[in-house]
Image (tube, grey):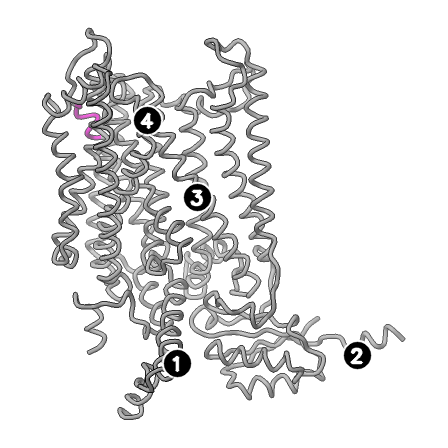
Amino acid sequence: MSDRKHLTREQTKDIDENIAWASINTDVLRSMENPRRGYWVAMAVSVCLFSVMIYAEVYQYMYGMGAALLNTSHMWDLYISTFVFWIGMSHSGTLLSAILHLVHADWRKPIYRFAEAMTTFSLMTAGIFPVIHLGRVWNFYWVMPYMTDRGIWPNFRSPLIWDAFAITTYLTSSVLFLYIGMIPDLAICRDNAKGWRKPLYTWLSLGWRGDDRQWRNFRFTYLMIACFLIPLAVSVHSIVSMDFAMSIMPGWHVTTFPPYFVAGALYSGCAAIITLFILLRYFFKFEHYMTFPILDKVCKLTFVIAMVWTYLNLVEFASVWYGHDIPSKEVLIAKATGPYSPFFWGMMTFGSVLPFSLLSKWVRRNMYVLFFASIFLNVGMWLERWMIVTPTLSLGYHPQAFNVMWPGWTEWAMVGGSFGWFGMLFLIFVKVFPCVSMYEVKEMVFHRKRTIYEDVDEMMTLHSGVPGPKAQAQTQTSGGA
Amino acid sequence: MAGSSKKIVAKTRRVLGLFGDFDQAFEVIAGIRRYQVPGLTVDDVTLKSPIEHPEIEDVLGERPTDIPKFAFWGGLFGLVFGFLFLAGAQANFLVQPQGGKPVITIPSNVVLAYEMMILFGVLSTLAGFIIGGRLMRKSSGLYDTAITVDQIGIVIEVTDKQYQPLTELFKKHNVIEMHEEALS
């Protein structure tokens, strides 16, 4: 009975502290076995989308960038919009893992692993777009500072080179952060694996035995990398914003762009966490770990970040409106009233108005409504990136370059394919690696049980003489026996 | 004479005791602290557990780690190397149009050196973890998979004389299972 109550919408605890440690292992390891039909359907959809992307890339390779309708002033459009979108998605893992780890918010423990995986795969997806948009994809390595026989180096003053450095560093650090945090769980997998998984987990767990020495070094390592990762995440999206802000294009040369981009990144990352939270909870039956109170907290966090993002939008609009930069003002007016205005107002509606629905407890506890709300929040965030890039390119300083550009099928195929690529990576991840951190859930259960059964018990007995939870549980056990 | 006394105290076996919870395991360690097993100290104890226990250092004593040093020196190396590498590359590429700007530009190089600081800091921290945690080494065969589930293990190397009092101490605190291996 108490078990069922744990799963209801009336639940108030982040986690049931009476979950047996062995059942945590069993539940999570079970989620990695035997993919069901829904999994294969999702995988098939992802592979189809990715295949369309490959076809579009081959087509673009053969016929040039004109196939993507990139011409005249429109050199970036959906490719770079979607690049910024995926970079933004990658900030979720850092927020949940690193920032909440440092502030000891233990409710993050059951959900941070998939957020970290999302970070890594989002970066791997984002990295595709600058390469695609080059046209000459085989020359992508020119941005890296390597020794050439001609003594040529990249232009280190260019924010595009900063991008290459920042994203490479962020991807490397994120992969290591994900991997290091997973080592104790990989040892659990090793101890329970058979067949091809056994050597894989044995190799990846690096001989982890759970020694006090290993735990101590593990704690410091995780803490140190978390400390490195937070400023890194901020710098990455600031640098991405500088791709725009360091130019003199109207609408881009804005001082608030770095914090605006970081807030947008955290926002879209949080919305994506809600989406994946609901999917994993439903498909893997993780109701004991991905609970409503934890979802509540993620929703509230998303709302707060949405308000920060809205505020920064208003700051940007006000500074352009009351400034004396006429071209920037024209771009702003064109966004609100021109051919792209439906998308601009869509962005404002999904990004600034829709988050207010998260204030409703009914919405936060209704999985179907919340799922679609989180999807539309991210649609708003994708539109935001599109509305940063395209209207400015349509209305730059040169009147001869004024034009309205609508993306062609090649660009849409690339955008859709990126979701397929991300989906493929994520689906493989959840079947090969544990998407809930087993040892951290055990820690969460251990500490909460200790708090309730010892600290609270002691205080209640000391101050009121009323038997505390521990004594009550003992009474119930002996009564039941 | 010294050789013969060394023979007497030589550790002959390694013992692993499994306990149901931290309290029992900590009681065993407290017993060792109280010299209930002659000649054994808390420094001989290795605790194996499924989670990181916050009070573990109160029981085992403070055992230092070098991870912060690895992080610091790695980060510092990344910062210095990053800046010098970029400056060196710029100083050797004078045919690049400078547009009236200095050859070695401080603001842009600071951005890139900052990224290199973090990259090398993270890589160095990982190296420190592998070295400090004694990972990727051939370790003792004395292990039980219950440790990654819900049991706490205490591993101690003992002499023949210490073996009996140690097993008694383990049993007194409800050891679930004991494994041992001979030391070569």
Q: Is residue B109 above or below residue A126?
A: above
Q: Is residue B155 left or right of residue B52?
A: right
Could you confirm whether marks 3 and 2 are on the same chain? no
Disc nearest the viewer among 1 and 3? 1
Earlier-in-chain disc, 4 versus 3: 3
Earlier-in-chain disc, 1 versus 3: 3
Q: Is residue A135 magenta?
A: no
Q: Is residue A216 above or below residue B145?
A: above
Residue A229, numbered circle = 3
Q: Is residue A408 magenta?
A: yes
Q: Give the range drawn in magenta.
A: A407-413
Residue at the spot of label 4 = A255
Question: In percent of the image, x 10 and y 21: which residue is there?
Answer: A338
Residue at the spot of label 1 = A458
Could you confirm whether marks 1 and 3 are on the same chain? yes
Q: Give the x, y percent position of residue A298.
A: 26, 53
Q: Give the x, y percent position of residue A104.
A: 40, 58
Question: In percent of the image, x 36 and y 58: which residue is there?
Answer: A105
Q: Which chain carries label 4?
A: A
Q: Do the residues labelled 4 and 3 touch (CB within 8 Å)?
A: no
Q: Are marks 3 and 2 in contact (CB under 8 Å)?
A: no
Q: Mark 3 lies on which chain?
A: A
Q: Main secondary structure of the magenta part?
A: helix
Q: Which chain carries label 2?
A: B
Q: Looking at numbered disc 3 in the image, what kind of residue is underneath it?
A: Leu
Q: Is residue A448 left or right of residue A220?
A: left
SS of the residue under disc 3: helix
Q: Looking at numbered disc 4 in the image, what kind of residue is underneath it?
A: Thr
- How far, Cα to Cα, is label 3 from label 2? 52 Å
